[in-house]
C-alpha cells in the first residue's frame, strides 16, 4: 500500500511516498481504507523532533531519539471499513468511520488497523471525509478544556484567543452550542471567518490589545500559548478560569498554586487524557444537527504532504489542513 514515510527527523523534505506492507486486522481489529487524514500542529513537531524541553526526554524514549521508531505519521482519519476481525461486533464491512490513531500514528497511509474499542465512531452523514478527518484533535481538545476543565455553562462570557485555528474554530462553535457569549481574537484576514462560525464579538489583535478592556470573562481560553498570564488573570471574573493548551513550567506552578489558594484558576492539562468515544458521539450529534462543522483551510493530496507540512508550519492556517487519499 502507499504511505508517507520518514526515516530520520528533519525538515518536511524527509517525508516521501513509499510502498509498505498492507496491515491485516487482528481478531479485535478493523481494517480501514483511509480516504482522508489531516496535518495537525503535532505532526510537524514529531517529524522534526521539535518538542518543548520538558517533553523531549519522554518523547524520545517513546518514539526514538536519533530516528523515528514509527516511520508513518498521521493521527486523524476517516474512511471505510474493508475487513473485520472475527471478534468484532460493533462494526461491519462498508461502515464509514472517523477517529484518532493516538500514539500508533499511521494515518498517512491507504490502510490502518484500529481496535474495535479505539477512539473511533461512525462518520457524520452530512460531512465529507475530509471534514470528518478533522473532527477529533481540535474539537476534543476544545471540549476537554472548556467543558471538562472549564465547566462552561449557559450565559458565560468566554474569550478565545487564537479563534481561527483548529482548536479555536472548534472552541467558538462549542461555546455557542453551550450558550455562552463568545469573543474571538484573531488576525485581520480571519475576522469574517470567526464571525461566521458564531463569535458575538471579534477582536483583531493586529490593531487592538484585547487586554485593554473593562470587560470581564468567566473563561479565557488561549489556544496557541501566546497570551500573558498576568494580564489575562486581570480579565477574569471571580472564579474565572484561564485555560492554556501550550504551557511552560511557570504555568504549571501557577496552576497548582491557584487550585489551592485562589478563586481564579490557571488550568493546564494534556487534553487527550480526557478524550472518550462518547465525546465523538456528541460531535456527531451536533454536526448532523448543523451546530458544528470543522473548518477546512486547505486540502492537499497525499502526494503533496511536504507542501502541506510547510503550510502548517507557517502558523497561519485557518481551522484545519486536510489530506485527501484517493
Image: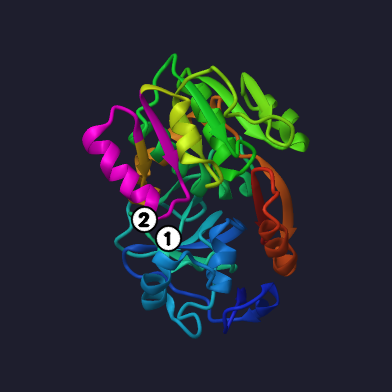
Q: Which mark is residue 67?
A: none
- Residue range of the region highlighted in magenta in the rendering: 239-265
- Pointers 2 and 1 in contact (C-beta within 8 Å): yes
Q: Nearer the viewer, residue 141 or 302?
A: 141
Rendered residue at 43%/71% (across/down): 56
Q: Nearer the viewer, residue 262 or 201?
A: 262
Q: Nearer the viewer, mark 2 or mark 1?
A: 1
Q: Is residue 285 left or right of residue 3?
A: left
Q: Is residue 257 left or right of residue 194?
A: left
* Residue 4 covered by magenta stretch: no
Residue 8 image-quadrant placement: bottom right
Q: Nearer the viewer, residue 179 or 181?
A: 181
Rendered residue at 62%/44% (across/down): 131
Identify residue for label 2. Answer: 118
Q: Please determine whether, in this image, residue 214 is positioned above or below residue 104.
A: above
Q: Which numbered disc, 2 or 1, marks the residue that appears first in the sequence?
A: 1
Identify residue for label 1. Answer: 102
Q: How many marks?
A: 2
Please rate how many residues cluster around mark 1, counting C-alpha atoms within 10 Å: few if below 14, some from 14 to 19, many from 20: some
Q: Nearer the viewer, residue 19 or 257?
A: 257
Q: Is residue 159 left or right of residue 147?
A: right
Amino acid at each position: 500500500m502507499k504511505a508517507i514515510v520518514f526515516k530520520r527527523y528533519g525538515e518536511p523534505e524527509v517525508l516521501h511516498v513509499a510502498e509498505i506492507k498492507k496491515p491485516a486486522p487482528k481478531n479485535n481489529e478493523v481494517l480501514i481504507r483511509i480516504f482522508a487524514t489531516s496535518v495537525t500542529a503535532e505532526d510537524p513537531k514529531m517529524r522534526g523532533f521539535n518538542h518543548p524541553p520538558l517533553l523531549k526526554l519522554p518523547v524520545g524514549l517513546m518514539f526514538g531519539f536519533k530516528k523515528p521508531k514509527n516511520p508513518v505519521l498521521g493521527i486523524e482519519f476517516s474512511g471505510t471499513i474493508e475487513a473485520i476481525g472475527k471478534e468484532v461486533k460493533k462494526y461491519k464491512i462498508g461502515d464509514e468511520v472517523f477517529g484518532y490513531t493516538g500514539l500508533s500514528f499511521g494515518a498517512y497511509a491507504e490502510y490502518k488497523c484500529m481496535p474495535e474499542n479505539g477512539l473511533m465512531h461512525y462518520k457524520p452523514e452530512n460531512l465529507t471525509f475530509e471534514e470528518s478527518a478533522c473532527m477529533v484533535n481540535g474539537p476534543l481538545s476544545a471540549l476537554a478544556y472548556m467543558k471538562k476543565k472549564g465547566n462552561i455553562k449557559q450565559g458565560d462570557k468566554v474569550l478565545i484567543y487564537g479563534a481561527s485555528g483548529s482548536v479555536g474554530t472548534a472552541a467558538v462553535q462549542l461555546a455557542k452550542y453551550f450558550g455562552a457569549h463568545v469573543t474571538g481574537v484573531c488576525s485581520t484576514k480571519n475576522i469574517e471567518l470567526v464571525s461566521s462560525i458564531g463569535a458575538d464579538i471579534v477582536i483583531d489583535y493586529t490593531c487592538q490589545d484585547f487586554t485593554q478592556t473593562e470587560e470581564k470573562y468567566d473563561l479565557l481560553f488561549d489556544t496557541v500559548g501566546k497570551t500573558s498570564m498576568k494580564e489575562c488573570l486581570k480579565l477574569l471574573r471571580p472564579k474565572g478560569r484561564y485555560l492554556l493548551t501550550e504551557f511552560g513550567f511557570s504555568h504549571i506552578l501557577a496552576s497548582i498554586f491557584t487550585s489551592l489558594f485562589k478563586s481564579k484558576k490557571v488550568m493546564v492539562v494534556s487534553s487527550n487524557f480526557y478524550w472518550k468515544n462518547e465525546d465523538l458521539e456528541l460531535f456527531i450529534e451536533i454536526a448532523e444537527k448543523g451546530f458544528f462543522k470543522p473548518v477546512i483551510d486547505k486540502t492537499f493530496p497525499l502526494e503533496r504532504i511536504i507542501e502541506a507540512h510547510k503550510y502548517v508550519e507557517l502558523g497561519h492556517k485557518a481551522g484545519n489542513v486536510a489530506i485527501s487519499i484517493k
